Amino acid sequence: MNVGILTGGGDCPGLNAVIRAVVRRGHQLGFKFVGIRDGWKGLIDYSIVPITKEMISGLLPRGGTILGTSRTNPFKKEEDAQRVMANIKKLGLGCIVSIGGDDTLGVAAKLFSRGINTVGIPKTIDNDLSRTDITFGFDTAVSVVTEALDRLHTTTEAHHRVMVVEVMGRHAGWIAVYGGIAGGADMILIPEEPFDVEEVAKVVRKRKEEGKNFSIIVAAEGAYPKEAGGSITKDRTLDAFGNVKLGGVGEFLAVELEKRTGIETRYVVLGHLQRGGSPTAYDRVLATRYGVRAAELIHEKKFGRMVALEGNKIVDVPLEEAAGKTKTVDKGIYAIAKVFFG
Ligand code: F6P
């Protein structure tokens, strides 16, 4: 069988490790692979590359994706969807492995409903995809945040400042909560619980009164003050899937906190650093497990499914149940984070 592989949406550490695992296991099962360049865009433009054994050598630790990625939505225009269908036929693809988050997997689910065999693999640093406990890339992003917080602690303490650290995560606070717990943040703000600026200022003042004259506040990019009624955005533009560009809560909060507490406050936006570079050991193993199982699903002709992690087991779930629903932060883990606020 000829199998196509694509990576879509924002890149994330572990994409190459997944490609390697799908192809290694797939070759053992007798499949041939072609790479589709830049996500779904490659199937609109017929931008294809054969995947050879040599190409997947040395991929395990490499960040980014050898196939490239984009946020192209072929269902925005019916003519693009038709081109995708026609190109799949022309290439003689028996299945497409799509590695992505809810947007990319949403397209895979739609194609499956139009009769195309697809198998999905959940990726995103945000960990906000439904029906899987963990997406690969998340652990690496959390490690980057943790290291950043360790470094920011020493300089913030030395200058007796407040540091606001804005992290990624879209409309879910997973990276903020896990990174904040691991890095010992004094307060963590997430989109799931809009914050009160004065409450944050109170925590900073109380710490000072208790002799801790520095504070580290982690703010998820989607976190927002109650009175704003919604996340802070960089501009009004939307991507092809209708996503807004989040950003600005760190700066907003730093200005407010300095005004309200009189303590010198700085902010850092960790941004795309969280997505770049080599995957952690955890992400390499998870990506490998997902990739191997995805190839086996094709062999078993279990199409329209996504590989997923349930507890510590790799399972498979219907693609359409994973796509389109944001998995928000579990209240239990946020309650643990709150024990250390202040
Ligand atoms: O979904 C992953 C993610 O990194 C989000 O955390 C972030 O909001 C967004 O992508 C950034 O996207 P871009 O790469 O388009 O700036």
Image: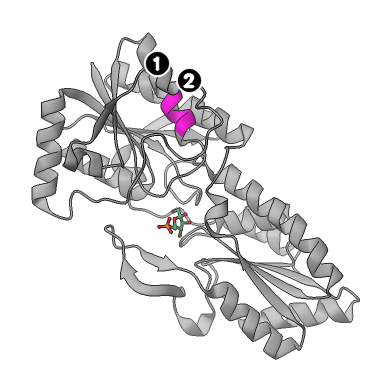
Q: Main secondary structure of the magenta part?
A: helix
Which residue is found at the position 69% from the left and 52% from the top?
146
Determine whether 95 is above or below 321 in the image.
Answer: above
Element assignment for label 1: loop
Instruction: Estimate the x, y position of residue 81 in percent, counting from the top left.
Output: 13, 45
Task: Report if the CB atoms under discs 1 and 2 are less than 8 Å apart.
Answer: yes
In the rendered structure, which amino acid carries the disc numbered 1?
Answer: Lys
> For residue 19: magenta?
yes
Determine whether 66 is above or below 195 in the image.
Answer: above
Instruction: Estimate the x, y position of residue 289 in percent, counting from the top left.
Output: 50, 25
> For residue 81: magenta?
no
In the rendered structure, which amino acid carries the disc numbered 2?
Answer: Ser
Q: Magenta stretch?
A: 16-20
Say the numbered circle drawn on residue 57.
Answer: 2
Instruction: Evaluate whether residue 198 shows in this view.
Output: no
In the rendered image, which residue does mark 1 sit on? Answer: 53
Q: Which one is in front, 42 or 163?
A: 42
- Rounded to the nearest angstrom, the CA distance separating label 1 from label 2 is 7 Å
Which residue is found at the position 82% from the left and 62% from the top?
154
In the rendered image, the residue lying farthest to the right is 211
Q: Give the total of numbered labels.
A: 2
Instruction: Estimate the x, y position of residue 37 in percent, counting from the top left.
Output: 29, 37
Q: Quadrant of residue 166?
A: bottom right
